[in-house]
């Protein structure tokens, strides 16, 4: 089955700096890669996603890049703010028929300091 | 448009009791997924259901765990004869049939077995 690895496990940046979180996946058939933000005591919130037919996607301060050949994808957050502090999870799945379960990475705890 | 609703938010059960977790998907969503999150870990897929059908239960423990999504009413995750190792956060997610890869999560039910 699919295996997703995520690094780093913790990341501390100063407000205004950029943060980068990286993930690798094992199943070359995976073709959908969402990123979720989870705040303490809450459920994961979908913040951006990318499909395998696209190499990069951007939404305001958040961008995701995908390298299918190397089987890795990254989340980039620019101009970080204290409210960006949370745990971020990458995930991978295969869009095919009715099967669409997500395999998650182990999470990155991002701390944005003033 | 209300999001995915889970209840209860917190549930305490003694060893050997039954736990019933409820999930109402987003309006218009007919696909429901259950995930389990152990402390400081990522989310692990358990089961994927459509109305009245279990599509994929490959992540579900073979014993004591069951799930249903009836024609009317919420999806139910049932854990019989709970043990301390069942203590975790259980998240439900839902997606629409047209974009079934895009899953939106509820706030979760935190189960504590004492």
Image (tube, coloured by chain):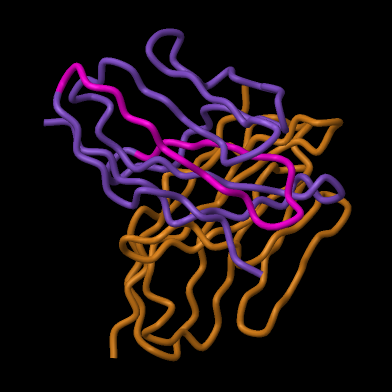
Q: Left or right: B33 with respect to A16?
A: right
In this view, the residue in front, B3 or B60, is B3
Residue B99: % across, % down = 82, 51
Q: Left or right: B79 with respect to A22?
A: left
Q: Is residue A98 above or below residue B59?
A: below
Query: Residue B28 appears in which quarter of the rendering?
Result: bottom right
Residue beneath the point at 65% across and 35% down: A101
Q: Is residue A11 above or below residue B112?
A: below
In this view, the residue in front, B73 or B28, is B73
Drawing shade for chain A: orange
Q: Residue B29 lies in magenta, yes or no?
A: yes
Residue beneath the point at 60% across and 66% down: B2
Q: Which chain is purple?
A: B
Residues shaded magenta: B15-37
How many numbered marks, from 0 up?
0
Residue A42: % across, % down = 39, 61
Residue B70: % across, % down = 64, 30
Residue B22: % across, % down = 46, 41
Residue beneath the point at 29% across and 46% down: B40
């Amino acid at each position: 089955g699919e295996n997703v690895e995520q690094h780093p496990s913790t990341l501390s940046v100063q407000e205004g700096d950029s943060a980068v979180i990286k993930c690798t996946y094992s199943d070359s058939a995976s073709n959908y890669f969402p990123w979720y933000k989870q705040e303490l005591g809450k459920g994961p919130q979908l913040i951006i996603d990318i499909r395998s037919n696209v190499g990069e996607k951007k939404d305001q301060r958040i961008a995701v890049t995908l390298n299918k050949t190397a089987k890795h994808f990254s989340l980039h957050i620019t101009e970080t703010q204290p409210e960006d502090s949370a745990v971020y999870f990458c995930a991978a799945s295969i869009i095919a028929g009715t099967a669409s379960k997500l395999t998650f990475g182990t999470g990155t705890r991002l701390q944005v300091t003033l | 448009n209300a999001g995915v609703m889970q209840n209860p938010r917190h549930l305490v059960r003694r060893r050997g009791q039954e736990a019933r977790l409820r999930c109402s998907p987003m309006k218009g969503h007919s696909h429901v997924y259950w995930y389990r999150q152990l402390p400081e870990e990522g989310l692990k897929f358990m089961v994927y259901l459509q109305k009245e059908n279990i599509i994929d239960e490959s992540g579900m423990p073979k014993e004591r765990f069951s799930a249903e999504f009836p024609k009317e009413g919420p999806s139910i995750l049932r854990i019989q004869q709970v043990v301390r190792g069942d203590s975790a956060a259980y998240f439900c997610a839902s997606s629409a049939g047209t974009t079934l890869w895009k899953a939106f999560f509820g706030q979760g039910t935190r189960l504590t077995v004492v």
